[in-house]
Image: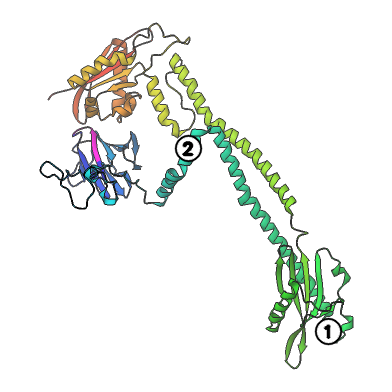
Amino acid sequence: MYRVTIVAGPNRGSSFMIREGENSIGRQTGNAIVLQSARVSKRHCVLLVSGNEVTVQDEGSSNGTFVNGALTKKKTIRPGDRVSVGEYILEIDVPAAKKPKAPPPAQGFGRGVAIPGSAPAAHRNHFPPVGGMAGMGGHQSAPAAPIVPTDLKGKLAWFLEQRLMPFFYGLNLKYEWSFLVVGFFMAFIVANLLVSVHPLIESGREAVVKEAATRARFIAKLIAERNSPFLASRAESKLDIDPVIEKSDGVQLAVLVDMDSKVLAPRRANNFLTSGPEAVLAVQARDRFERNGSAVVKALDSESVTAIEPVLLYDSTAGRNVTVAMAIVTVDTSLATPDIGEMGVVYSKTLILTGLLGALIIFALYRTTLRPFQVLTDDMDKVLKGDLVRITREHKFSELNSLWDLIDSTLQRVPKGSATGQLSADSGPSIDEISMPVQMIGNLQKQPIVVCDSNRIVVYLNQSFEDVSGIRSDSAIGQTLSSQGREQSFIALVDDLLDRASSVGTAVDDYEFSGVAYKLHAASFGSGAGGARGYVVAAERQEG
C-alpha cells in the first residue's frame, strides 16, 4: 500500500492511500485523488500500482506532469519521489506499519498473578520473541523482512545487491579501489581462459578423433576389399596386409580375422586375437554383423580409435550376403592431439595477450574514472577563488550528478576569494548572513519571499512562496530562479525584474499565479563594483 501526500500547494499535508491498479488524479469528481485547481486538468495523470512498482503516466494534461522537476509522459517512481501536478506537489511513500501495543502485565492485588507451572515472576515477560509472539509482553519485535521484488529483473537486482555485493563492498573497506579493479580483471582473465580456450582445445581434439576414426575405417575397407576375392576362392594362402598400411604412422594394429577371431593375415605365431580391447570389440562386432549390422567404429581410450569392417560373401544356401571375416584397424590419435606441453604454450600465449589487452583496458578505465574527480577538484578551487561561477559538467557521469549538485550548491554559499586566495575587498558578509533577517521576516509574516545571490541563484525560498508559485525549495535552491518557471512569461518577467532591480535598486511588476493576481517586488542589496550581492523577491497578493 502506498500513500500520496501533498507537500506543497493548497491543502498541504493532506494524504491519500492508493490501491493496486489505476489511480487517477484530476480536478473532476470521480478521480481517486481530486485536486481543485484551474491548472489541474479534469483527468491530469494516473498512478499505476503493480506490486512493488508505481508508475506515473500523464493523461494529456494541459500543464504537464513533472517527476522530481522533470517533465515526463510516463515514468516509474520510487518512495520519496515528488510529482508536480499544477501547483500541487505530491510525494509518494510507503506508510510505516503500526507496531502493536504491548498489553499490560497481568495484575493482582498489587502483585503479579502467578500462573501455575509458569516461570518465576522475575523472569516472566523476558521470553525471546518467537514466531507470532514477537513484540508481545514488552519485547522488541524482530526486524521486518526486506521486501523482495516480484518481477524477474527486480529479483535479480535485489539478489545481487543484498547477497553478492556486500562481499565486494567489504573488500573495498580493506583494499584500495585500484587494487580491487586489477584483481577482478585478473580473475576475469583466468575465468575466460577456462571457459573459452579449454573448450576450443577439446573441440580440436574431437575433430582429431573424428578424423582418425575416418582414417581407420578407410584402411579397414581397403583390407576387406583387397582380401575379399581370396576368401571367395578359398585361397587363404594369398591373404595378406599391405606392408605400407602396417608401417603407416599412427597405425597400431591392422589384421584380418575370421568370425572366431582367428588371425588370417598377417600370419603370426599367435593365430588368435584373444586379448586387448580390440578382441572385446571384435566379439561385439561379430554379434552385430550376424544381425546384418554395418561397420563398427569406437574410441577404445583417449589415445586410440578402432574400426572393424565386415568382409561379405554371397551364401547361396542363405540366399544373401553373410560376413565371413572382419578387417580390424586401430589408429593412434595422440600423434595429432596436442600434449600437455603444447596446451601449456597455447594457454601461456593466450594469457599474455589477454593480460596485455587487459592492462590497457584497466589503465583507460582507471584514468577515465578519475578524470571527472580531477576536473571537479580543479573547478572547486577556481570557484573558491572567484575564477569560475559554477563547476563544469563536461564528463557524462550520471552517478555523480547528485554529488555535483550538492557541491555546487554548497560552493554558492561560500564567500569567493581573489586569485591570491584572499577574500576580495568588497566580499563582505556572505549571502547567507545577509539573507538571515529576510528569512526571519518571511517566516514570521508568512510573506512569499525568495532570496537570490549575485548570480541569481536561489539560496532561500520559504513555504509561502512554494504554496503560491508551486516552485519547490528543495529543487530550486542552487538553481537560477528563472529556470524554475514552467511558463515563458514567468521566466521573462523574473529576468526583467531582476535586471531593473540591479540597475535602480528596486522593481515592481504584476503576475498571476493560478489565476490569482500578485504584485512581485524585487530589490537588490550589497551593490558594489562587481554589481549586486543579492536580490530579494516578494509576492504581494492583490485583493479584488
Q: Residues within 10 Å of mark 2 (few under 14, many from 20)?
A: few
485 left or right of 117 in image: right
For the residue marked with disc 2, what is the amino acid? Gly
Which label sits on residue 183? Answer: none
Residue 256 sits inside the magenta stretch: no
Q: Magenta part mainly helix, strand or loop?
A: strand
| Residue 328 in the image, given as x and y percentages of width and height | 78, 74
Question: For mark 1, does the 10 Å Cα neighbourhood hold few (<14), some (14 to 19), or many (20 or more) residues?
Answer: some
Q: Is residue 521 visible?
A: no
The tag on residue 231 is 1
User: How far apart are labels 2 and 1 at the CA level?
Assistant: 79 Å
- Quarter of the image for residue 479 reads top left
N-terminal label among 2 and 1:
2
Magenta extent: 4-10
Disc number for residue 170: 2
User: Is 376 left, or right, of 246 in this rendering?
Assistant: left
Q: Which one is nearer the viewer's eye here, 183 or 396?
A: 183
Screen quadrant of the C terminus: top left
Residue farthest along the bottom direction in this orientation: 317
Tell me the kind of residue under disc 1.
Answer: Leu
Tell me if residue 528 can be seen: yes
